[in-house]
Image (cartoon, rainbow, N blue to C red):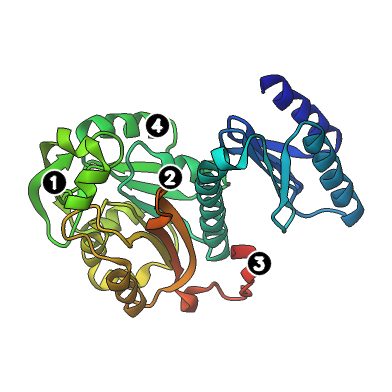
């Protein structure tokens, strides 16, 4: 597969395209100013071409398709100058490809929202080891990032990731409705939470059996905003929430200052992994009441045996915050 990958890269280069690895065996070809191929999962690539001359675009698409078919691969035209190239049996790669493609499209949607609403500060709540912030940088965001992570071992990795980025700040705390000290349930990976696992969560994720606790600090978002935004002329903040069931509590801690945010995203649940975790039907109306409107929904986790979606990454914007002179362009942010 490595040799096949290199041959695909050489072919793409001949047409002035960019190849981005999505995952082993999967690439994305793109045709914009700097086209790219990104690996989305095992044996699957997303190839995005972007904008360009129609004839050149058609030739590039045809070349990729011809090459892929000759190698026993499948090509799916996604529209908007993108192709999904898949190697392997459909029944073996469908689930990871779908998951990875959704994550990729969600990242692209978020990046477009930040550009469209001219965001200059992203509050990254539940930062873990900095995956979200790293993707922001890769997708072209150059503004400030303010990450919050309370778990000590993970915090060390986050600080290491941010150390060479002067406009990436790290706060060693969680955010909530009240400023306090409390115990965090520390779980392997990215599943630590201030909430305990539900019966369903404990059954699905065996790692909850090895939960330990750590004393952490919880602060209110409205108490840290002035410090976090210091030095930014005309702040246009965006709020990203990924707190393993605690998003509404972190959101409440913004108080009336939530009106200052031009957009946000939150993981909204259909299945409760944590005890007391709000469901999507409860969370989305609260965000809407605060003035945000949904711009996109992207599955985060899915129960493969049944096909049920457990959580969506819900992205929202405050339409009234659209910069003066900007034109709403659904194709740009969708």
Q: CA distance from mark 4 to mark 2?
A: 11 Å
Q: Is residue 3 visible?
A: yes
Residue at which label 4 appears: 161
The spot of residue 50 in percent (x, y) is 74, 52
Above or below: residue 158 compared with residue 217: above
> Farthest residue in the right direction?
55
> Farthest residue in the top direction?
3
**Disc nearer the start of the sequence (3/2):** 2
Tag 4's secondary structure?
helix
> Residues at badges 4 and 3 in contact (C-beta under 8 Å)?
no
**Disc nearer the start of the sequence (4/2):** 2
Q: Residues within 10 Å of mark 2 (few under 14, many from 20)?
A: some
Q: Residues within 10 Å of mark 3 (few under 14, many from 20)?
A: few
Tag 3's secondary structure?
helix
> Residues at badges 4 and 1 in contact (C-beta under 8 Å)?
no
Residue at which label 1 appears: 217
Q: CA distance from mark 3 to mark 1?
A: 42 Å
Q: 136 or 67, which is in the foreground?
A: 67
Q: Nearer the viewer, mark 3 or mark 1?
A: 3
Q: CA distance from mark 4 to mark 3?
A: 33 Å
The spot of residue 12 in percent (x, y) is 80, 35
Q: CA distance from mark 3 to mark 2?
A: 23 Å
Tag 2's secondary structure?
helix
Q: Residues within 10 Å of mark 1 (few under 14, many from 20)?
A: some
Residue at which label 3 appears: 331
């Amino acid at each position: 597969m490595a040799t096949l990958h290199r041959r695909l890269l050489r072919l793409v280069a001949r047409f002035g395209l960019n190849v981005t690895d999505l995952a082993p065996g999967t690439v994305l070809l793109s045709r914009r100013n700097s086209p790219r191929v990104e690996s989305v999962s095992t044996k699957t690539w997303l190839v995005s071409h972007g904008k360009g001359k129609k004839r050149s675009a058609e030739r590039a698409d045809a070349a990729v398709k011809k090459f892929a078919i000759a190698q026993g691969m499948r090509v799916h035209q996604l529209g908007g100058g993108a192709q999904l190239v898949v190697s392997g049996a459909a029944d073996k790669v469908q689930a990871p490809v779908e998951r990875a493609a959704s994550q990729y499209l969600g990242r692209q949607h978020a990046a477009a929202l930040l550009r469209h609403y001219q965001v200059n500060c992203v509050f990254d709540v539940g930062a873990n080891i900095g995956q979200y912030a790293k993707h922001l940088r890769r997708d072209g965001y150059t503004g400030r990032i303010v990450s919050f992570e309370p778990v000590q071992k993970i915090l060390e990795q986050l600080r290491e990731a941010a150390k060479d980025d002067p406009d990436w700040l790290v706060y060693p705390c969680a955010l909530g409705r009240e400023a306090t000290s409390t115990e965090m349930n520390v779980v392997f990976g990215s599943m630590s939470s201030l909430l305990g696992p539900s019966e369903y969560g404990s059954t699905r994720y065996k790692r909850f059996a090895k939960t330990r606790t750590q004393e952490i600090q919880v602060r209110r978002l409205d108490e840290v905003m002035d410090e976090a935004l210091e030095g930014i002329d005309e702040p246009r903040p965006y709020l990203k929430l990924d707190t393993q069931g605690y998003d509404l509590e972190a959101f409440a801690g913004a108080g009336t200052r939530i009106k200052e945010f031009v957009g946000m995203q939150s993981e909204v649940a259909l299945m409760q992994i944590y005890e007391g975790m709000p469901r999507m039907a409860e969370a989305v109306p609260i965000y809407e009441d605060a003035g945000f409107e949904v711009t996109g929904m992207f599955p985060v986790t899915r129960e493969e045996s049944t096909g049920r979606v457990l959580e969506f990454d819900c992205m929202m914007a405050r339409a009234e915050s659209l910069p003066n002179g900007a034109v709403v362009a659904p194709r740009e942010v969708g």
